[in-house]
Image (spheres, rainbow, N blue to C red):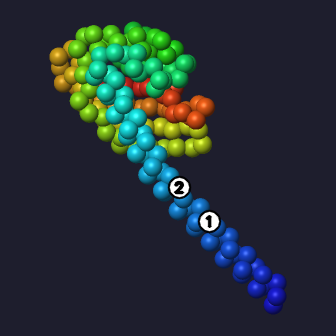
Amino acid sequence: MKAVLILVIFFFTTLLMFAQEKEKPAVGRDSLLADFQSYVQNWITAYNGGDAGKLIPLYAEDAEYISAHVEGLAVEGRDRVIENFQNGMNMGGHIDSVEILSMNVSCDLATLLCKYQAINSGQKAMGRNLLVLKKINGTWLIVTHLTVV
């Protein structure tokens, strides 16, 4: 009887621990989503400001940008990614909006699926972005940026 009582107490204690752990990520998730929304807004502000150099702090050194808008469909390395965005800015590119549709986070990796509206070469464009971010030295940096129009 004593063994059964110990098992029941152990079961409910374990259940209570898991219930409390499950609540914590929801609060953290909301906070992280708000952080990423601010991050995306900073990206838009930097891009629309016309100075791609302001995007540098948002990208990892080994970042890659994948898009049909670039020769070979991809550019690798932060410097080349930033150069590509500067070319888009110089051609009158403008981001109207970016909406995060979904967010997935595991340890130091996050993915953001976004819907964007922009002006490319004077034409309205709507598409999707997939951003893969990695937390490096406490800062979320874009390691892969995929754009589909």
Q: Is residue 135 left or right of residue 111?
A: right
- Residue ID at (25%, 18%): 93
Q: Is residue 147 visible?
A: yes
* Location of residue 55 in the rendering, given as x and y in whole percent from the top left corner: 41, 21
Mark closer to the chain start, 2 or 1 = 1
SS of the residue under disc 1: helix
- Residue hosting label 2: 25
Q: Is residue 76 visible?
A: no
Q: Which residue occupies 48% across, 28% down?
A: 142
Furthest-bottom residue in this view: 1
Quarter of image, res 94: top left
Q: Residues within 10 Å of mark 2 (few under 14, many from 20)?
A: few
Distance between mark 2 and mark 1 Cα atoms: 12 Å
> Could you tell me which residue is drawn at 53 percent across and 23 percent down?
60
Position of residue 58 measured from the top left corner of the image (x, y, whole percent): 46, 26
The circle drawn on residue 90 is none
Q: Picture coordinates of residue 24 (x, y %)?
A: 54, 59
Q: Amino acid at mark 2?
A: Pro
Give the quadrant of the N terminus: bottom right
Q: Amino acid at mark 1?
A: Phe
Image spot of residue 73 (x, y percent): 41, 15
Relative to 83, is 30 above or below? below
Point out the image quarter for the C terminus.
Answer: top left
Classify mark 1: residues with Cα within 10 Å, few (<14), some (14-19) or many (20+). few
Q: Secondary structure at mark 2?
A: helix
Which residue is label 1 attached to? 18
